[in-house]
Image (tube, helix red, strand yellow):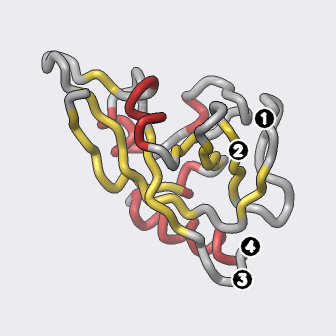
């Protein structure tokens, strides 16, 4: 069902971007949320705190951003961590500065891009079906 919802939302992202959903492989760390929860219900920003770009699901371009501070430490398997490699339908991207009061991108945009650190950029989405948890990557840092 998650895949079907993603495919449908991808169509809406394409509408804002001349027919191109502008898909990208992005990284997402779940920190304390079990990946199994995301595989059931998707990247639901309603259960996350408010970040630099408001309450959104954040997806990093750089793997180290997600793997360092946002990785999920697997219970009962010392040293093993997990992050998602997700398909994200970015659509037309609005570049913005951080603002914790952002509720969604401006009209005509599907996502927001901004700096989450001095060197790291991320895509923020505000619709739960705009990304799909394609791969769960397990690693030892």
Residue 127 left/right relative to 75: right
| Residue underneath mark 4 | 16
Number of the front mark, 3 or 1:
1
Instruction: List x then y, in percent, for residue 38.
Output: 39, 40
Residue holding disc 2: 114
Of mark 2 and mark 1, the one earlier in the sequence is 1
Mark 2 neighbour density, 10 Å: few (under 14) some (14–19) many (20 or more): some
Q: In the image, what residue occupies the spot 59% across and 39% down?
A: 120
Query: Along the horizontal axis of the image, is 86 left or right of 56?
Result: left
Q: Residue at x 61, y 62 (%)?
A: 90
Circle 1 residue:
98
How dense is the environment of label 3, judged by Cα within 10 Å: few (below 14), some, or many (20 and up)?
A: few
What residue is at 59 percent from the left and 73 percent from the top? Answer: 21
Q: Distance between the residues labelled 4 and 1?
A: 22 Å
The residue singled out by tag 3 in the image is: 18
**Coordinates of residue 63 in the picture (x, y in percent):** 41, 42
Choose top left, top right, bottom left or bottom right for residue 31: top left
Tell me the quarter of the image containing the N terminus. Answer: bottom left
x and y percent of residue 106 in the render?
A: 85, 55
Whether residues under marks 2 and 1 lie with C-beta atoms below 8 angstroms apart, the answer is yes
- Whichever of callouts 4 and 2 sits on the residue coming sooner in the sequence is 4
């Amino acid at each position: 069902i998650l895949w079907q919802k993603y495919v449908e939302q991808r169509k809406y992202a394409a509408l804002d971007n001349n027919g191109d959903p502008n898909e990208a492989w992005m990284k997402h760390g779940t920190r304390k949320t079990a990946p199994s929860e995301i595989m059931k219900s998707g990247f639901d920003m309603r259960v996350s705190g408010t970040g630099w770009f408001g309450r959104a699901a954040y997806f990093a371009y750089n793997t180290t951003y997600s793997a360092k501070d946002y990785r999920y430490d697997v219970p009962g398997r010392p040293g093993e961590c997990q992050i998602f490699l997700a398909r994200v339908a970015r659509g037309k991207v609005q570049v913005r500065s951080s603002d914790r009061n952002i509720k969604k991108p401006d009209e005509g945009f599907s996502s927001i891009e901004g700096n989450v650190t001095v060197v790291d950029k991320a895509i923020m989405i505000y619709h739960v079906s705009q990304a799909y948890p394609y791969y769960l990557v397990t690693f030892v840092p």
